[in-house]
Image (cartoon, helix red, strand yellow):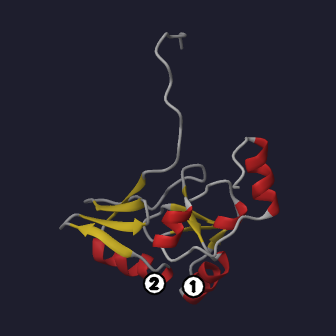
Amino acid sequence: MTDSDIPRAHLVGINHVALEVDDIEAALDFYGSIFEFELRGQTEAAAFLDMGDQFLAVTETDESSNNGDDHRHFGLVVDDPTTVERRLEELDVEWLSIQGLDFRDPWGNRVQIVGYEEIQFTKADHILEAMELSDLEKSEAAIAELSEKGMAPE
């Protein structure tokens, strides 16, 4: 790779994650049994699960792979990981012994659940308020990580 005079873009966050499934309705039922969400939109071959200023795109394909590897995954930030744990137990979804709260959906996509308070990812106050999550706070460890980067909340 060569150096260039063209500046590099900064990574800011996740716009969306796209998953391939073999049945849109089954995917909506599965994710709807774990998470509360609004549909941003839906077509015959895709559904868009709203997460405030981000979304999860679920696209129907002819063949869905159930043999994902342990490195490819996406992380979903939630307000209460314990609630997800309980839902997964209720649905008899097996956790992966990789780290934290990881599991595979019925199509082989590895999902990692992380609590908002424990990570650097921060939603603006007006976004949290609009999502009716204005009571979410960051842990001391997350604030320390943010402080090290000069991004601590005021």
**Number of numbered tags placed on the structure image:** 2
Q: Nearer the viewer, residue 65 or 42?
A: 42
**How much space separates mark 1 and mark 2, taking CA atoms?**
7 Å
Figure quadrant of the N terminus:
top right
The answer to whether any part of residue 27 appears in the image is no
Q: Earlier in the sequence, mark 1 or mark 2?
A: 2
Outermost left residue:
44
The image shows residue 150, relative to residue 32, as above or below, that is above
Q: Secondary structure at mark 2?
A: helix
What kind of residue is marked 2?
A: Ser
Mark 1 and 2 residues: CB-CB less than 8 Å, in contact?
Answer: yes
Which residue is found at the position 65% from the left and 75% from the top?
Answer: 81
Tell me residue 128's x, y (percent). Answer: 53, 68
Q: Residues within 10 Å of mark 1 (few under 14, many from 20)?
A: some
The answer to whether any part of residue 59 appears in the image is yes
> Which disc is residue 49 wearing?
none
> Which disc is residue 33 wearing?
2
